[in-house]
Image (tube, helix red, strand yellow):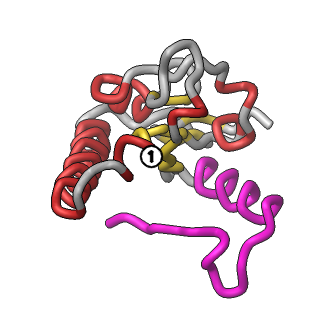
């Protein structure tokens, strides 16, 4: 089972510090955390809009990178990976907006399948060390 958390839609909404505390708690408990994003054309970094930002060696980051590639950003630059989570920039929002509604729906379904397959892949791997999850270890 998955838990989907939108910090801004939680009741009550979570402040950033509360969200990071939740990620730390999940990571310590061995529960992988994945933050799913999409970026527009204006967010291109070194020619990429999509990719994974995760700790080196994190099983979930490696599995997602097989499909989405690696985003050219050091995981230490972002709070979520430092807390043990992973981030996937999973779609080009500009390109997605240009699709017809039915094509957009198909594209979103495909992205969701790719993420689900990566999560299924990590379930077959050995468990990480205590205090860590498949998305990383608490480093902050």
User: Residue 108 vs residue 97: left or right?
Assistant: left
How many numbered markers are drawn? 1
Relative to the observer, which residue lies in front, 133 or 23? 23
> What residue sits 64% from the left and 69% below the top?
7
Quarter-wise, where is residue 123 in the image?
top left
For residue 17, above or below residue 121: below
For the record, the magenta segment spans: 1-28
Question: Mark 1 highlights which residue?
Answer: 93
For residue 50, above or below residue 130: above
Q: Residue 88 location, x and y as percent?
A: 47, 38
Q: Is residue 70 magenta?
A: no
Q: Tag 1, which secondary structure?
A: helix
Q: Is residue 10 magenta?
A: yes
Q: Is residue 34 visible?
A: no
The quadrant of the image that shows the N terminus is: bottom left
Q: Residues within 10 Å of mark 1 (few under 14, many from 20)?
A: some
User: Residue 26 vs residue 95: left or right?
Assistant: right
> What residue sits 38% from the left and 21% below the top?
69
For residue 39, above or below residue 13: above
> What residue sits 46% from the left and 20% below the top?
70
> What residue sits 79% from the left and 60% below the top?
16
């Amino acid at each position: 089972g998955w838990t989907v958390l939108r910090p801004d839609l939680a009741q009550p909404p979570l402040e950033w510090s509360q969200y990071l505390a939740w990620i730390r708690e999940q990571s310590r408990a061995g529960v992988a955390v994945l933050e799913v994003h999409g970026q527009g054309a204006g967010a291109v970094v070194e020619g990429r809009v999509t990719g994974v930002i995760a700790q080196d060696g994190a099983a979930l980051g490696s599995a997602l990178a097989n499909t989405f590639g690696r985003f050219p950003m050091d995981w230490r630059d972002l709070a979520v990976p430092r807390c043990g989570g992973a981030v996937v920039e999973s779609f080009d929002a500009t390109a997605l907006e240009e699709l017809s509604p039915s094509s957009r729906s198909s594209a979103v379904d495909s992205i969701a399948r790719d993420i689900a397959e990566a999560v299924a892949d990590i379930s077959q791997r050995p468990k990480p060390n205590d205090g860590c999850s498949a998305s990383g270890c608490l480093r902050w």
